[in-house]
Amino acid sequence: MKRSQRRLLMPIGIAGITALALTGCVGDDAGGGGEGDGEAADCSTFEEYGTFDGAEVSLYGTILDAEADRLDESWADFEECTGIDMVYEGSGEFEAQINVRVQGGNPPDLAIFPQPGLLASVAGTGSVLPAPDSVVENAQEYWTEDWQNYGTVDGTFYAAPLMASVKGFVWYSPTVFEENGWEVPTTLDELDELTATIADSTEESGVTPWCVGFGSAEATGWPGTDWVEDYVLRTAGPDVYDQWVNHEIPFDDPQIVDAMDRVGDLILDPANVNGGIGDVSTIATTDFGEGGLPVLDGTCGMHHQASFYEGFWSEDGSVEVAEDGDVWAFLLPGAEAGESPVTGGGEFVGAFSDAEEVVAAQTYLSSPEWANSRVSLGGVISANNGLDPENASSELLSQAVEILQNPDTTFRFDGSDVMPGAVGTGTFWTGMVNWVGGESTQSVLSTIESSYP
């Protein structure tokens, strides 16, 4: 169950998030809420959505725990001003249960799909309704063509994006790097050299280059797919990446084998992992949420994980995420200096009802007003072009927003999210587990290729 928000199952520990919590709109530029002072919502922001007496809209998705609470808070003013009660239900079994509910004639009004591939699968049953005009208009104004395409199936636009994440960050301790004279790499070759340098000094420094965790209950393996996707995009290029994701070339094409072997040089070498945890075999059993924590105690040099991982460093905000703080991150570099193509993920809101209150809610969720409201609450970002990066809860997340909004960014959606479910959330995941267990790259990729529907 790999998607950007499904990974946020632990309480977010970002300093100041609770202080940012919004309880009501006060007419700020972002269209977000108030400052927790109990002021009533400024309903002029929501006049366009209409008013409803006792209407209810059900939403179903993968977002759980503290993140689900913030989701509820993000639309509180919309509820107050429109009279629509937004009833959200989160589930760790969304991917299986959404189909069960659809087939049983009990779908939610709105579903927050954690991956384009699943949206396409469910839309293929004819149960998801095409997006209403108001959502189409918002998508065309506030989202890039690429993001619109991820919500489009066979030429029909069904779902506008919601939140997003930038993947491929490498987290590290600025203090540990400074004490050892290590520099942030600007190319993949320099990253290899840095890895070797840290490994050579492990006995003296006590730092092992990498710490890695692929564990995620029934979704174990997904962090490995992120590694492979990042390297395919950087070493083979965006065109080959697209061909691979769309199965226009075999899954085990030599270019994919080379990219995965390059990852293996880093994380399958016993000298490089698993810092602060154990040997290579512990990668498969270490929960992804805990995989990077040895960075904090100086036993691990680097951890590869998406922007959302900022929320995993502490539960109480005691860990400072800053360039001169306890932990920071650099984007996985490209093959050449200055080249850092980006992979990312996000959710998409599809509808099973066209009731007026459902259209109103779906439209609001595609707006910059909602994006600014939710991002201001902390821990997440959005690719909505109407989002003010300053509303992000940290400097790193602000940078991630700017990366997504930059028209010159070479962006590709998480490949396994777009692939057919049997592959992207099936054999690709299990293949990563088999790989760290000792199976060869060629064997793993060939098995995945043979699983294609």
Image (cartoon, rainbow, N blue to C red):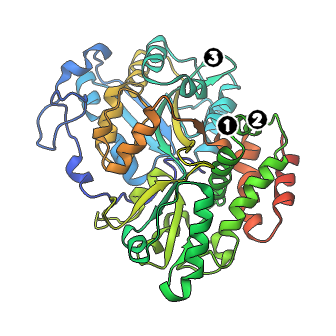
Query: Which of the two residues, 34 or 218, is positioned nearer the viewer here?
Result: 34
Q: Residue 33 falls in which quadrant of the image? A: top left
Three-letter amino acid code at the position of disc 1: Pro
Residue located beneath label 3 in the image: 156
Q: Secondary structure at mark 3?
A: strand
Q: Residue at x 56, y 73 (%)?
A: 209
For residue 238, the mark is 1
Tell me where residue 71 appears, x and y as whole percent. 37, 41
Three-letter amino acid code at the position of disc 2: Gln
Pointer 1: residues within 10 angstroms few (<14), some, or many (20+)?
Answer: some
Residue located beneath label 2 in the image: 243
Q: Residue furthest top?
A: 133
* Mark 1–mark 3 CB contact (< 8 Å): no
Q: Residue at x 80, y 54 (%)?
A: 257
Q: Earlier in the sequence, mark 1 or mark 3?
A: 3
Pointer 2: residues within 10 angstroms few (<14), some, or many (20+)?
Answer: few
**Alpha carbon of mark 2 to alpha carbon of mark 1: how far?**
9 Å
Q: Residue at x 71, y 39 (%)?
A: 241
